[in-house]
Image (spheres, rainbow, N blue to C red):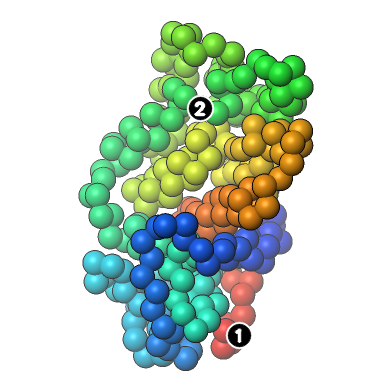
Amino acid sequence: MNSIFLRRSIPSLIRLCSRSTSSNFGLTNRERKRFYKQVSIVESSQSPTKYEILLDQRKLKTPLGNIITIENELLALSIAQEWNQQMKKIDLSSMHMNSLINTVIDNPLKLTKTQLIDKIMYFLDWDTLLYRCDYPEEFKQLQTESWDPLLKCINEQFHTNFQPTYYLDVKDLVKKSDRNIMEKYLANFDVPSLTIFLFIVEQLKSIFLTISLIKQFQPVEDIATLSRLETEFQISRWTNVEYHHDYELLDIRSKISAAYLIFYCLNNNVTSTVLSKEKLQ
């Protein structure tokens, strides 16, 4: 991967991670008053170096009571920043990195590597980029212009032959050989990485968009827009529903930004940090 690209984009990525409204739209989110004054990270072990997050002097733990221990300084600082950004009340629904790390560490459903790959591969049969709408003609053309370049990149990189369709009753749209290639690609990742990969796929409804994000074919903002192309098309024809479409777009951007940052840190051994090691402000 292009580490220079990531380092330049990290500040904007972290800002995107935190761009979510305080409304949870009916989701369970018990509000708590902020009970701490300072947030910091501390080395908990060496060889390899691991970091813990402190709220004052309290060690941050997962919902199952496991101490959050992270081998990546950048990731530890990013999660600490999420906690530091909380105001008088703690809004857990806006803390996407914290939520994902909790899931990675606790693995509440006890999913194995094979189960995670199966869940991801389920989306391949109904991938957003493969099944398209042929009406109206303007939208058909927009899909071709927006999605075909990414699908071409996927086919070139993986030596596959994924082709889109405008019919729902097509049998064996995904060839067995292409499916095997995708499964082998996913098998290269461990359980924590696959957990994050699955989360991104669920948000984007597309394995191909997820791979495009991970391989940096397009920035986060563009990937989020491509995942909701029909919505963007309808907005261009009719209008934007204020406080709904805007929230929806910012929410998916913040979620996949958080997931992408975690995935990158888990798989690229980032040791140098672009964030200040001084007191978080």
Q: Percent position (x, y) of residue 113?
A: 30, 42
Q: Is residue 38 visible?
A: yes
Question: Disc 1 or 2, which lies upstream in sequence?
Answer: 2
**In which quadrant will I find the C terminus?**
bottom right
Identify the residue at image location x=26%, y=70%. 66
Are the two marked residues, 1 and 2, in contact with CB atoms closer than 8 angstroms? no
Instruction: Name the spot of residue 153 as percent of width and height, x first.
Output: 65, 29
Q: Which residue is mark 1?
A: 281
How many numbered discs sit on the rendered protein? Answer: 2
Measuring from the top left, give residue 185's x and y in whole percent: 45, 34
Residue 16 in percent (x, y) is at 62, 61
Q: Which residue is mark 2?
A: 127
Q: Secondary structure at mark 2?
A: loop
Q: Secondary structure at mark 1?
A: loop
Relative to 86, residue 121 above or below: above
For the point 74% across and 41% down, which residue is it? 239
Quadrant of residue 119 in the image? top left
Which residue is pictured at 41% across the width and 40% down the height? 188
